[in-house]
Amino acid sequence: MTPYEALTTATRLGQIEPGMYADLVGLGGDPLTDIRAAADIRFVMSNGMEYTVDELVAPFEAPAPVPAGGVLPPVPAHPGTAQFWWHDPQ
């Protein structure tokens, strides 16, 4: 699959005009010539506001609080996963 085919398969192309809703991603290269450029995100524009990658990631970088004793409680089993062998704790 060419980079063009991969990008058009994974995205739905629309119109970019004033007054239209759009989420845009600014890249540091041309993913049509090098698909790895699709991971070189420089900014994201959502609802008319521009955000850097650092601004978007910052809320998720804070470490999770460690409970007393330093051990997290076990995750309870979900009844919907009982049918899948890879969820068996044994």
Image: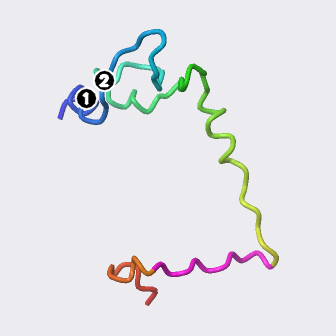
**Would you say the magenta stretch is mainly helix, strand or loop?**
loop
Q: Position of residue 81 (x, y in %)?
A: 39, 77
Location of the C terminus by quadrant is: bottom left
**Span highlighted in magenta in the image:** 69-78
The relative height of residue 32 versus residue 68 in the rendered view (above or below) is: above
In screen coordinates, is 45 left or right of 11?
right
Asked if residue 74 is among those painted magenta in the image, a careful observer would answer yes
Most distant residue in the left direction = 1
Query: Which residue appears farthest toward the front when viewing the image?
Result: 19
Across the whole image, how many numbered discs are drawn on residues? 2
Q: Quadrant of the N terminus?
A: top left
Q: What residue lies at 68% left-to-right and 75% top-to-bottom?
A: 72
| Residue 69: quarter of image | bottom right
Image position of 8 with respect to 74: above or below: above
Left or right position of 69 against 41: right
- What percent of the width, then of the height, locates residue 73? 67, 79
Q: Does residue 53 lie above or below 78 as drawn?
A: above
> Secondary structure beneath disc 1?
helix
Mark 1 or mark 2, whichever is nearer to me: 2
Q: Which residue is mark 2?
A: 13
Q: Residue at image x 68%, y 47%?
A: 61
